[in-house]
Image (tube, grey):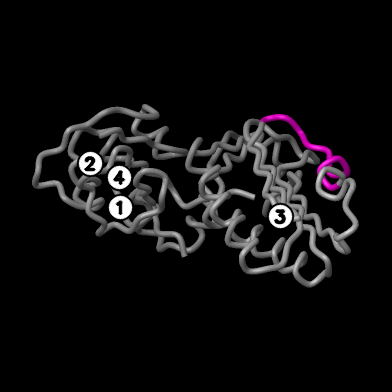
Amino acid sequence: MKVKYFAWVRERVGKAEETVEPPASVRTVDDLIAWLAKRGESYAHAFETPRVIRAAIDHAHVKPDTMIAGAREIAFFPPMTGG
Amino acid sequence: MTARATIRIQEADFDIAQEIAALTKGRTDIGAVVSFSGICRGSEHGDPVAALTLEHYPGMAEAEIKRHADEAMSRWPLNGLSVVHRVGRITPGENIVLVVTASSHRQAAFEAAEFLMDYLKTRAPFWKQVERASGSNWAGWRRMWHCVPISFISGNRVPEVR
């Protein structure tokens, strides 16, 4: 699946998007955050406080306990500050 | 005539009069137009702001705004609706966002414009980076730092937004 990062999550991870293949044990958005956080120092820094991270699956906002099965694109970003 | 929503995300500035004219031209059923424009301030919490850089999630931003524009049109009797949101670097005094609503009567136009702006501020996938003389930081950052215990700050942890 494709993963995208925005704003300071993107800056901390150091890339805007990538393709990842998490193991089957990674079932929810929260699981994916925990799995990504273990990929290295920059990821650990980006995801050090999971509760401030917002997520979207295929362009729709989702909650942390949402299942990721079938997702094509998952995005992680901080709280939105538009307008 | 059925209402249509115009949604644009662009780097270029917009002309408010032109956007209103696009909704009302040739029509006699519109009795009220409300426009809200958000403008870049030159200071934030007393600190001078050099510029804002707005980032968005292409694809999701358009789809999310469209969904809320459709909701506004189903909740209020609107004759037209436009949302224009700028991205990229914006300096103080420049436009950031525009919402225009048109209806037969003013109440629907006021309420729908407020509904859409409230949504754009809190749920639409846009992020502001604030550029100051001292450097850049993401909007909401300062507010977050202000409401957390010192232990969080000294531990260099990202605090929760309240």
Query: Which callout, 3 or 1, points to the residue nearer the camera?
Result: 3
Residue beneath disc 2: A37
Residue beneath disc 4: A47
Residues drawn in magenta: B11-20
Q: Disc 1 is attached to a residue of which chain?
A: A
Q: Disc 4 is attached to a residue of which chain?
A: A
Q: Is residue A30 left or right of residue A16?
A: left
The answer to whether marks 2 and 4 mark residues whose Cβ atoms lie closer than 8 Å is yes
Q: Quadrant of the N terminus of chain B?
A: bottom right
The answer to whether marks 2 and 1 mark residues whose Cβ atoms lie closer than 8 Å is yes
Residue beneath disc 3: B3
Q: Disc 3 is attached to a residue of which chain?
A: B
Residue B122 to residue B139: above or below: below
Which residue does the image show at 50% across and 35% down from the upper left? B58
Q: Callout 2, which amino acid?
A: Ala
The answer to whether marks 3 and 4 mark residues whose Cβ atoms lie closer than 8 Å is no
Give the spatial CA distance, label 3 vs label 4: 43 Å
Q: Callout 4, which amino acid?
A: Phe
